[in-house]
Amino acid sequence: MRAQSAFQTAEALVSSGNYEAAKSLLEGSRFAGAEAVPAAYLLAVVYARTNRLADAEKLLREILSREPEIDAVRIELIKILALQGKRQGAGYHLNRLTETADLARDKDQLDQLARRIGVSQGFSLSGYFSLAPSTNINDGTSQTTIMIGGLPFAIANTAREQSGMGVRFGAVAGYSHALTENTSAYASLSAGLSDYSNDQYDKQQAELRTGLRHDQLRYALQMEAIADRHWQNRKGRSLGIGGRVSAKWNVSKGWWLSGEVIQMYRTYDGISAADARTTRATAAIRHAFSQRLTMSVGGSFERETVSARPWNSYESSSGTLGIEMPLAYGIRVKATATAGTRDYEDLFPGLRIARHDAFWELRGSFTKDNFQIAGFAPIVTVFSKEQRSNVALYQHQSNGMELTFTKAF
C-alpha cells in the first residue's frame, strides 16, 4: 500500500472513530515528503482520542519544533496541555498563538481555547530554586584604588567581604476568581530566600498582591496593590507598600504595545532616614515576525526620592532591546540588551560632585521545550553587566551564569 493511500485510509478510520485501526496503520507505515507532518499530526490526534495524552503531547511538540508556523498543531497542543492540567504551558502556547494570529478572524476559536485552559480561575502554585553566585556587598567597587577628597585609597582584596556561593528558592501561591467572562479578581502570596555560606548575606522576603484583571484578546488591563517585607539574615530590614497598573494592546496583527506604572513607598527598620518613594514607568512595543522570531524595544523611567538623604535621590532612564527565537533541538533563547543612566540630585557626602552612573547589561535565557529534571524545568541564564560612576565606590563589573529550576503544580 502506498503512503498516500495509507494516509487517506487512516483519515477515514479516524473520521469513523476507529482509532485503534488508525493507530496501527499510522504506526506501521512510513510517510515521507508532504505527508510526513500531516501523518504525525493525525497520529497525535489518535493518541489524544485514546487517552495517551503524554504521547500526543510529545509528538505535537516534535512537530512544532520543526514546523512552528502550523496553528492547527499548536491549538491541538493547547487542548492536550489543558486536559493534563498544565495550565502554565497551555497559556504559553496560547500567547504564542495570539501574537501572530489574526485576532479579529480567529476571535471565537481563541476565546474557546482561553476558557478551556481556565487560567483565570482557581488555585495555582509554582516554585523555583537556583544557584546564587558569590558577590560582595552592594556590588561594590571593582577598582583597586579610589579617590576620596582628592586623596587615593587602596582597596585590598581581603577588604572585600564575600558572600560565598548560595542558593535561592521560593514559591508562589495564587487564587483567581472570575467575576465576569473577561474580568477576574486575584490574590497571590510569594515567599523566597537566598542562603549563602556567609550568613550575613542571607535574605528573606515575602510579598502579597491583590488586584483585578480584565482580559480581552486584543487588550488586557490589570490593577493591583502590593505589600512586601524584606529581612536580612532573619532580621527585619524593610517594608514596602504600593501598587501597579499595567496594560497591553494588540495594535495590529503581530504588533503589541504594553506599558506599566509602579509606585512604591519603602520604610527601613530603625533607619527612617533611608525611607524612599519610588515611581517607575515602562513602555515597550513587541512584534512577532513569525512563530520563529519576536523582537521588542522598550524604555523605562524611574524616580526615587529619599527626603532625608537627597544625595541618594535620583532619576534614571534606560532602553532595552529584546529578541526571542528558537535555536535547535527545541531550545529557545530570550536575549535582552539594556543601557541607561542614573543621575543623583545632591552632592555626594565627602565629595564636591553629584553622583552620575551609566550602566549596561546583556542577558540571555535558554529553555528547552518539554524537558524536565525531577519534574522541574531548568532555565539557564548568562549575563554580563557593568556600571560606571564618577563616584568610584559604585563602579563595578560582573559576568555570570544562573541555573534556575521552576515547577508549576
Image (tube, rainbow, N blue to C red):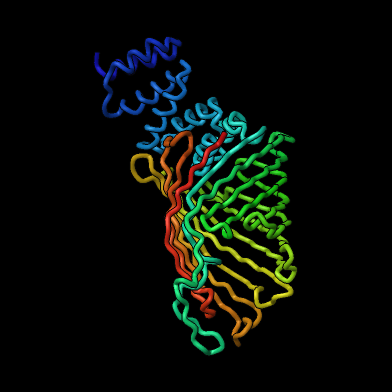
**Front position in the image: 50 or 128:** 128
Question: Relative to 134, is 346 on the left or the right?
Answer: right
Question: Relative to 269, is 137 on the left or the right?
Answer: left
Question: Relative to 60, is 237 on the left or the right?
Answer: right
Query: The C terminus lies in which quarter of the figure?
Result: top right
Looking at the image, how many numbered discs can be counted on the residues?
0
**Front position in the image: 108 or 31:** 31
- Residue 337 is situated, as x and y percent measured from the top left of the image, at 46, 61
- Residue 296 is situated, as x and y percent measured from the top left of the image, at 49, 55
Query: The N terminus lies in which quarter of the figure?
Result: top left
Is residue 114 visible in the rendered image? The answer is yes
Is residue 334 visible in the rendered image? The answer is no
**Front position in the image: 177 or 111:** 177
- Residue 108 is situated, as x and y percent measured from the top left of the image, at 59, 32
* Residue at horizontal 54 percent and vertical 31 percent from the top: 86
Determine whether 162 is above or below 98 in the image.
Answer: below
